[in-house]
Image (spheres, rainbow, N blue to C red):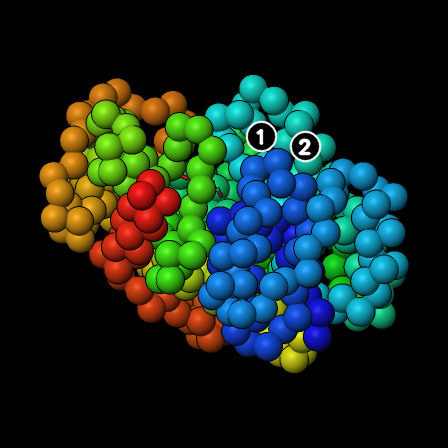
Amino acid sequence: MKILVTGGLGFIGSHTVVELQNKGFEVVIIDDCSNSNEDVLDGIERITGIRPLFVKLDLKERDKVEEFFKDYSDVEGVIHFAASKAVGESVEKPLLYYENNIGTLVYILKELSRKNNASFIFSSSCTVYGQADKMPITENAPVKEAESPYGNTKQMGEEIIRDTCKVTPNLNAIALRYFNPMGAHPSAEIGELPIGVPQNLVPFITQTGVGLREELSVFGDDYPTPDGTCIRDYIYVVDLAKAHVVALERLLEGKNKENYEVFNVGTGKGSSVLEVIKSFEKVSGKKLNYKIVGRRPGDITEAYADTTKANEVLGWKSQYSLDEAMKSAWVWEQKIRS
Ligand code: WQD
């Protein structure tokens, strides 16, 4: 069974490729390498012993996408990670985000709609909820006005898939709304490779720990939370990768109740920025250099998942703790800087 993973050289994509191969799937990766590099293939091969097929391709090139699906007509499922994902950049370059994140999704859905049976997993995000009114957040929480073009592309992506599935009974899709992915594979052969100054908290922490950054700026400690810093649901990337395989198998085995379903993928536990820092200090044995600064525009106070639906309907539950995930992030950071 051949599965296409777009963006398969990226952080979550590469970890998902490993879990797919562990379950016996044959994987072909499409990646344009705009935010990743080909030697991730070596890391995947060192872990599983199987080098995935790889096609370097820009999914914005419609004719190339058509050609791919002709050449790989035996692809039965697609896990679609390929997208631009920097919130700040999306505000400055909205059209780049709409073209890259929406245009490519449409091209892939057009190809899948032609097949007599296709399974599609979409990489969505808890960003669609904005600042939800109630914690933990369920899948029925209202989708709020997006705070950025990036978040809007996730909301629009879900709507495009929903509308397509309504008129395409042979297309079965699941959108996974990730909370905050973190960590690296326990082998330290693959992990997060942020290009430039990391936007996200955990890579900034580990880069500070390894001496690449002077100190971490904590964006605000005056939020209405127990310790004043923002709360998020940090999910270990290997747990997240496994959720994709479980979701894909649900569709391939015809266990889905409707041909478009949505699941939150988180741990169900919220952690504040200061708690994440404490986790790093505990697993590394190092004091982290940080200072409290002003709030970052666009940040929400709190977001953590209600994971009941994923646990009971999808049959998936996160297995790893914040400390275990942080340990893997720290081991990875030290390895790539050694
Ligand atoms: C987490 C917390 C910051 C950096 C983003 C995207 C989301 C998803 C995950 C793609 C916040 C604080 C951060 C720093 C800090 N990405 N922080 N100092 O913003 O929850 O989610 O990444 O799907 O769509 O929005 O993650 O890691 O940037 O921030 O204090 O140097 O850490 O204020 O409270 P976020 P994050």
Q: Position of residue 296 (x, y in %)?
A: 34, 24
Q: Give above or below for 167 relative to 9.
A: below
Q: Where is residue 267 in the image (x, y as percent from the top left)?
A: 34, 60
- At 83% from the left and 57% from the top, the residue drawn is 69
Seen from the viewer's position, the closer of residues 96 and 64 is: 64
Disc 2 target residue = 98
- At 37% from the left and 50% from the top, the residue drawn is 182
Q: Which callout, 1 or 2, points at the residue further toward the start of the chain?
A: 2
- At 76% from the left and 38% from the top, the residue drawn is 60
Disc 1 target residue = 149
Amino acid residing under circle 1: Pro
Q: Where is residue 253 in the image (x, y as percent from the top left)?
A: 65, 80
Q: Position of residue 136 (x, y in %)?
A: 34, 54
Q: Give above or below for 51 relative to 181.
A: below
Q: Quadrant of residue 167?
A: bottom right
Q: In which quarter of the image is residue 172?
A: bottom right
| Image-quarter location of ligand 1 | top left
Mark 1–mark 2 contact, CB under 8 Å? yes
Seen from the viewer's position, the closer of residues 333 and 257 is: 333
Q: Is 16 on the left or on the right of 98, as rendered? A: left
- Mark 1 element type: helix
Label 2 within 8 A of ligand 1 by Cβ: no
On the question of residue 153 being in view, the answer is no
- At 25% from the left and 55% from the top, the residue drawn is 327
